[in-house]
Amino acid sequence: METVKTLPYSRSRLWNTAFLLLCLCMMDAIFTDLGLRQGVIEELNPLMRNIYEMNILLFYFIKFSLPLALLFLTAKLTHLMYLRMMLMATLLLYVIVIAYHICWIVLASLQFF
């Protein structure tokens, strides 16, 4: 059985991961924006809450640029295993956040019935 360390590095796998991360990131930003506009959620991150209240476009820019920065570091420093592990941890975190968003969307829609 191969471990993460023995798997060959693949540029296409990195781009697939990058695309997935950006999609999850933008889904998070859109769901958060919709939830805040509808008043069904609160932004739990105090820094992002302040940024959202200041400027929604800045909120989207930061939500988009932070994963890009991580991907840039990962692409430039591919030999460092901890950076690739950070990328995987970020993906896992976004999957959890999207699942949380889906839960509140379902709960909010059930309240309308």
Image (cartoon, rainbow, N blue to C red):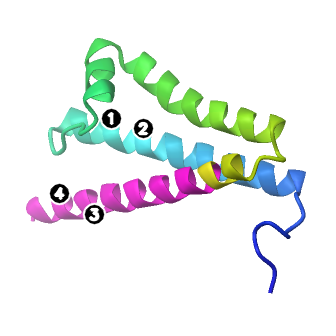
Task: Measuring from the top left, give residue 113's x and y in whole percent.
Answer: 9, 65
- What amino acid is at disc 1? Asp
Q: Earlier in the sequence, mark 1 or mark 3?
A: 1
**What residue is at 88 percent from the left and 58 percent from the top?**
9
- Residue at which label 4 appears: 108
Q: Which residues are magenta?
A: 87-113
Q: Amino acid at mark 3?
A: Cys
Which of the two labelled residues, at mark 1 and mark 4, occupies the earlier sequence position? 1
Q: Which circle's residue, 4 or 2, is located before the other in the chain?
A: 2
Question: Under tag 4, what secondary structure?
Answer: helix
Mark 3 closeness class: few <14, some 14–19, many ≥20 residues within 10 Å: few
Q: Of all residues shown, which one is farthest toward the top?
A: 54
Q: Which residue is mark 2?
A: 29
Given the image, on which type of amino acid does mark 4 rest? Ala
Answer with left or right where residue 49 lies relative to residue 87: left
Q: CA distance from mark 3 to mark 2?
A: 16 Å
> Of the numbered discs in the image, which one, if any, rests on residue 33?
1
Q: Residue at x 15, y 38 (%)?
A: 39
Q: Residue at x 77, y 75 (%)?
A: 3
Q: Are marks 3 and 4 in contact (CB under 8 Å)?
A: no
Label 1 to label 4, Cα distance in Å? 15 Å
* In the image, residue 92 lies in the stretch drawn in magenta: yes
